[in-house]
């Protein structure tokens, strides 16, 4: 590797380098302790220095120095991991530089020329790699060490590296931590003791910061049942964040493909950089905080002051700019924030050229003034260009008119700073709607009804209208603490749909996709899939007691929304609980709005909730358990196993408490959820457990605890709800229980915010990432245990061997996905299928793994043999092999009897294994996991497997001429290189000759009109003996030549008996078995025990190295 020329004053400092080659201008040196000799004590010291210190000259085993005869200064210009690499650089210098140097007169010119050439070479290399790195030179050094120490495939992308200590017990090992796209690696070398660690991100169960008596703070990694601890003096938080991002990236790419496909910025594993990961994480936080569409990315951040009209002062915060949105959040993130879609911006003006301020004019006669913006000119130009790109046809007014309107706004604002109305305006409500919310249709408000509940409802509406006057209404409304206070008190029925759309961000989705929902409804109309069948089944189970869903109006709207969403997102399709949630959305929002609210919930606010594995809900349950441990220690002391709360709270998370609370109370919870996200549900869950603390501590079993919680939820009411009794869900039975008091939902929510409102959304998101690793690995482990339980009944391997074999099988699947963008092999992993079918290998993957595990160490032509084995065990001929099929083959080859092993080899030379084309398996894998599942076909297949009789040797067809010749060749290939190769070859030749002569005798005896005299068999026997003797001689000669396996087998088959092209002959398996049983050397070869455990250990080491080669 060429290096930026660096001055070295001492050529052989401390005698650490040995000169291998030199000439007038260049010196090639080898570092002591490397190459020949090892270097003794000096080598140990050098190795320790190479690990601890950060310098290429102290790491690379070879280097090239440049010098001139009249100077004592040397320049390092190249280094290499291997001698071949450094020699290649040396030869390049001899051919391209040495001849040119003779034309220069001065040493300075020579040195300047060499340095310029080397820098040019480095710049040329840098065009294709190492871009966007903070310090390319140091990164090149680290990359060199990374490649040298870990020998990973060249495609593996190093992301970053840190100096750290790895703790083995109570003893730290100082070394280097390397974080790459697919692996966490550590290397240490101290006084002859080498520590090397390679952990793939997809094997990590837990990743968290921790502390103990010895370490104040460290990073704890749990992988493959082992704990690893890393500590460092500096950059611990930065290191942990990068590790967390890489682990999350790997989990999404390999296990959670549906979520990963929505993140195009990270699709190519060869282009992942530290800077790219940081930018992606910031964009993710930006979208989550402001509830923006997933397509938005954080482009610019500017610190500034924003004039807040309702408080009459400037608040410090940050302007965040994306492709289509201008957002502002105050410094603490909670005082106020505002979201301005670019489509709403009319113009941007600078009121005073001397001040660093700008005013953003928004449609509806609103204006926002930002001051003390450092790069205000560029920000103003950026906003203008973005608005021009995303401007709608409604912005067709002339530029002069717009400029005049904005200038008048600015002048008025400067003259009348207290005029709040102009600053925030009123919502434009001129748009016509095609449908109404179901609650409006089935429970219209009676204006003349002035009962206490309706009066209170009107008071709530008045409070919100005052709030709108002060803080704005619609997409550009200020979000403040007062907004949350109003939410906690309860949202008026008339405003619920509007506010849900605003808080969730669905209002922006709908505004930017006009007509999209109507198109989806038309396209999905009449489609028939598994999702539509499930939707039809659940339609009448969705709030059946509500009048809206006792009529065709409500049922049809629900059907259209759910079917349209299943059509939009077939990966999710339809899952239970979506119907309950959508029913409530339809009560308060128009049909199209309900659709976009469902999109916001499923794709942004509750990611991974609505799929077959409900990963998102399981993750949030784990977060909930952590919060219980932190906030309710008394409950934890009594109930050490918190898995009970996970099971009982699943419906809380999936349905946002709608399934356990009466509808009139549940909608208040949904109000809080749309404003605060999952944090609101976690807070309420803690409040429910806290409210029932004493009763739960006193219960004796889980059933009693469930009863206590169910009674509590039945007692929750909404005393302010204006809904009539026909709509409310509170059971009448509760009124008869005078001993059980009621709990008001508003009081419960207020208590949740007072006690647990300090839970920060950032902490929840961090906990989500941390627990997602554990949840997915737990699901993967469950899959593995189920597969092993099924397979163990049919093979002789122990449970521990199957466990290790499964890990090898799964790792082989992932190895083909590590370095490929959108690898088709990822399609072979489908968690929605049965356990055995979730991981399957195609032929190329199978071939690599089989070559590592097959029992024939010296076998030649393994690729062809692997192809035949693959075809044989691929029972359903879908071009994929599952773990059960793979284990069955290995079980036969390692633990089967001689007869079974021979039968396996015999079947390799029969259809379907032998007669297919030789271009690999060639069948297209069927589409899986989509459309309707043919349950009858599954049942029939299951029945056939149960009734399937064990195959006997008599069931096998006869092997014909060409198949038998190939069978003989296969035996020669298997025996090749074995210590007893010669005797095995001779035995095969003898058996081949004997079988051919037996066939010849049998054929002649069956010929019609053939004279059956006693002389014929005798002469035949004599001929057979002679041929056999000739065969043994020819085999001995052939075994001494390199081409003996193929030449001897073909020679044997052609010399025995008549010309095989004239007469077709064949053998039964019984004949082949009987003949081979008479050859002890062959029987001993197949019956000798092989250490399968050692073979798996070698395969585990060889998997990565084979990929690297």
Image: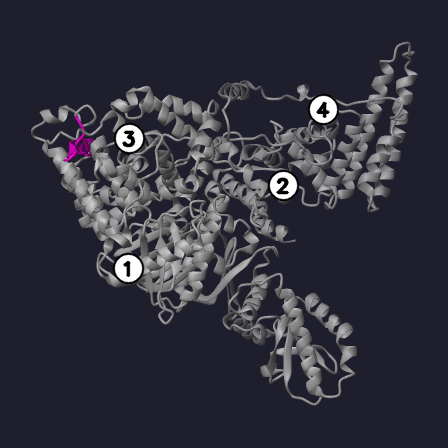
946 or 974: nearer the eye? 946
Label 1 environment density (alpha carbons within 10 Å; few <14, some 14–19, many ≥20): some
Give the SS element for disc 3. helix
Residue named by callout 1: 412
861 or 584: nearer the eye? 584
Q: Is residue 58 left or right of residue 589?
A: right
Whether the residues at callouts 3 and 1 have beta carbons within 8 Å, the answer is: no
Mark closest to the chain's N terminus, 3 or 1? 1
Give the SS element for disc 4. helix
Whether the residues at callouts 4 and 2 have beta carbons within 8 Å, the answer is: no
Label 3 environment density (alpha carbons within 10 Å; few <14, some 14–19, many ≥20): many
Whether the residues at callouts 4 and 3 have beta carbons within 8 Å, the answer is: no
Residue named by callout 3: 587
Mark closest to the chain's N terminus, 1 or 2? 1
Q: Residue at x 36, y 47 (%)?
A: 291
Q: Is 1000 covered by the magenta stretch?
A: no
Give the Cα separation between the discs numbered 1 and 2: 80 Å
Give the Cα separation between the discs numbered 3 and 1: 43 Å
Mark closest to the chain's N terminus, 3 or 2? 3
Tell me the number on the disc at residue 1069.
4
Q: Nearer the viewer, mark 3 or mark 2?
A: 3
Label 4 environment density (alpha carbons within 10 Å; few <14, some 14–19, many ≥20): many
Whether the residues at callouts 1 and 2 have beta carbons within 8 Å, the answer is: no
Q: In the current view of this chain or complex, which residue is farthest to the top? A: 1009
């Amino acid at each position: 590797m060429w290096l930026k020329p660096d001055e070295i004053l001492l050529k052989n400092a401390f005698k650490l380098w040995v000169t291998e080659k030199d000439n007038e201008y260049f010196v090639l040196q080898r570092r002591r302790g490397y190459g020949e000799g090892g270097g003794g004590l000096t080598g140990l010291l050098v190795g320790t220095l190479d690990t601890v210190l950060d310098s290429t000259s102290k790491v690379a085993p070879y280097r090239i120095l440049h010098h001139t005869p009249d100077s004592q200064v040397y320049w390092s210009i190249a280094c290499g991991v291997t001698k071949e690499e450094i020699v290649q650089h040396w030869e390049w210098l001899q051919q391209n530089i040495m001849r040119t140097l003779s034309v220069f007169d001065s040493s300075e010119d020579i040195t300047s020329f060499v340095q310029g050439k080397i820098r040019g070479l480095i710049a040329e290399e840098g065009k294709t790699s190492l871009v966007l790195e903070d310090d390319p030179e140091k990164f090149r050094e680290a990359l060199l060490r990374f490649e040298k120490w870990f020998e990973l495939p060249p495609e593996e992308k190093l992301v970053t590296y840190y100096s750290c200590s790895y703790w083995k017990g109570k003893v730290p090992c100082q070394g280097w931590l390397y974080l790459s796209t697919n692996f966490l690696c550590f290397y240490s070398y101290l006084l002859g003791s080498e520590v090397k660690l390679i952990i793939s991100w997809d094997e990590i169960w837990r990743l968290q910061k921790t502390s103990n008596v010895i370490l104040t703070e460290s990073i704890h990694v749990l992988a493959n049942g082992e704990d690893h601890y890393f500590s460092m003096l500096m950059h611990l938080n930065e290191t942990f964040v990068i590790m967390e991002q890489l682990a999350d990236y790997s989990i999404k790419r390999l296990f959670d493909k549906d979520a990963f496909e929505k993140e195009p910025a990270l699709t190519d594993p060869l282009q992942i950089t530290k800077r790219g990961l940081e930018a992606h994480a910031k964009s993710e936080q930006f979208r989550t905080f402001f509830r923006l569409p997933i397509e938005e990315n954080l482009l610019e951040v500017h610190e500034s002051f924003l004039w807040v009209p309702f408080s009459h002062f400037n608040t410090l915060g940050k302007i965040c700019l994306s492709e289509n949105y201008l957002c502002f959040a105050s410094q603490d993130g909670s005082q106020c924030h505002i979201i301005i879609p670019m489509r709403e911006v009319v113009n941007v003006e600078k009121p005073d050229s001397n001040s660093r301020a700008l005013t953003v004019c928004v449609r509806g006669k609103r204006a926002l003034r930002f001051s003390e913006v450092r790069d205000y000119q560029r920000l103003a130009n950026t906003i203008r260009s973005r608005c021009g790109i995303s401007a709608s046809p409604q912005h067709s007014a002339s530029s002069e008119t717009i400029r005049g309107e904005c200038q008048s706004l600015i002048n008025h604002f400067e003259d009348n700073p207290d005029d709040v109305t102009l600053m925030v305006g009123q919502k434009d409500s001129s748009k016509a709607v095609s449908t109404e919310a179901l609650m409006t249709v089935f429970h219209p408000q009676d204006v003349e009804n002035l009962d206490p509940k309706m009066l209170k409802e009107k008071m709530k509406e008045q409070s919100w209208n005052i709030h709108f006057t002060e803080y704005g209404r619609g997409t550009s409304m200020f979000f403040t603490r007062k907004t949350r206070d109003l939410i906690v008190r309860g949202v008026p029925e008339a405003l619920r749909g509007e506010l849900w759309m605003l808080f969730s961000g669905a209002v922006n989705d709908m505004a930017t996709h006009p007509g999209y929902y109507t198109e989806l409804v038309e396209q999905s109309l009449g489609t028939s899939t598994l999702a539509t069948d499930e939707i039809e089944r659940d339609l009448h189970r969705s709030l059946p007691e509500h009048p809206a869903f006792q009529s065709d109006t409500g049922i049809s709207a629900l059907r259209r929304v759910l079917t349209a969403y299943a059509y939009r997102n077939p990966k999710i399709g339809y899952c239970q609980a979506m119907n309950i949630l959508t029913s409530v959305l339809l009560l308060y929002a128009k049909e199209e709005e309900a659709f976009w609210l469902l999109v916001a919930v499923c794709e942004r606010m509750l990611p991974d909730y609505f799929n077959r594995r409900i990963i998102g809900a399981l993750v949030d349950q784990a977060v909930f358990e952590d919060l219980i441990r932190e906030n309710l220690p008394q409950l934890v002391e009594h109930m050490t196993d918190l898995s009970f709360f996970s099971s009982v709270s699943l419906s809380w998370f999936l349905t946002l408490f709608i399934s356990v609370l009466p509808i009139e109370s549940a909608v208040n919870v949904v109000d809080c959820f749309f404003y605060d996200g999952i944090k609101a549900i976690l807070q309420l869950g803690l409040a429910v457990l806290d409210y029932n603390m004493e009763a739960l501590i006193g219960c004796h079993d889980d059933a009693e605890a469930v009863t206590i919680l169910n009674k509590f939820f039945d007692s929750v009411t909404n005393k302010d709800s204006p809904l009539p009794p026909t709509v409310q869900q509170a059971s009448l039975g509760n009124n008869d229980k005078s001993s059980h008091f009621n709990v008001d939902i508003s009081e419960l929510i207020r208590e949740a915010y007072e006690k647990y409102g300090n839970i920060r959304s950032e902490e929840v998101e961090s906990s989500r990432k941390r627990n997602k690793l554990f949840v997915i690995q737990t699901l993967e482990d469950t899959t593995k245990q189920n597969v092993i339980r099924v397979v163990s009944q049919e093979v002789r391997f122990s449970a521990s061997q199957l466990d290790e074999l499964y890990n090898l099988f799964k790792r082989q699947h992932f190895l083909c996905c590590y370095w490929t963008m959108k690898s088709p092999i990822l399609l072979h992993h489908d968690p929605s299928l049965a356990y055995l079918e979730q991981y399957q290998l195609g032929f190329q993957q199978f071939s690599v793994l089989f070559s590592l595990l097959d029992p024939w160490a010296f076998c030649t032509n393994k690729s062809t043999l692997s192809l035949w084995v693959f075809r044989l065990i691929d029972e359903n001929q879908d071009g994929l092999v599952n773990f059960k099929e793979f284990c069955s083959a290995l079980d036969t080859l390692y633990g089967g009897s001689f007869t079974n092993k021979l039968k396996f080899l015999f079947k390799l030379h029969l259809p379907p294994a032998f007669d297919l084309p030789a271009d690999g398996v060639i069948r297209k894998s069927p589409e899986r996991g989509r459309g309707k599942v043919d349950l009858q076909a599954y049942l029939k297949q299951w029945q056939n497997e149960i009734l399937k009789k064990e195959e006997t040797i008599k069931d096998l067809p006869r092997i014909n001429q060409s198949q038998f010749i190939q069978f003989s060749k296969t035996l020669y290939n298997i025996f090749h290189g074995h210590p007893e190769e010669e005797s095995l070859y001779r035995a095969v030749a003898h058996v081949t000759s004997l079988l051919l002569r037996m066939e010849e005798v049998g054929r002649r005896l069956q010929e019609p009109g053939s004279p059956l005299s006693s002389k014929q068999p005798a002469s035949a026997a004599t001929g057979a003996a002679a041929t056999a003797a000739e065969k043994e001689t020819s085999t001995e000669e052939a075994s001494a030549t390199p081409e003996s396996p193929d030449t001897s087998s073909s020679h044997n088959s052609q010399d025995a008996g008549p010309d095989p092209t004239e007469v077709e002959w064949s053998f039964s398996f019984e004949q082949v078995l009987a003949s081979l049983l008479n050859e002890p050397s062959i029987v001993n070869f197949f019956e000798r025990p092989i250490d399968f455990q050692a073979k798996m250990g070698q395969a585990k080491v060889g998997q990565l190295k084979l990929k690297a080669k």
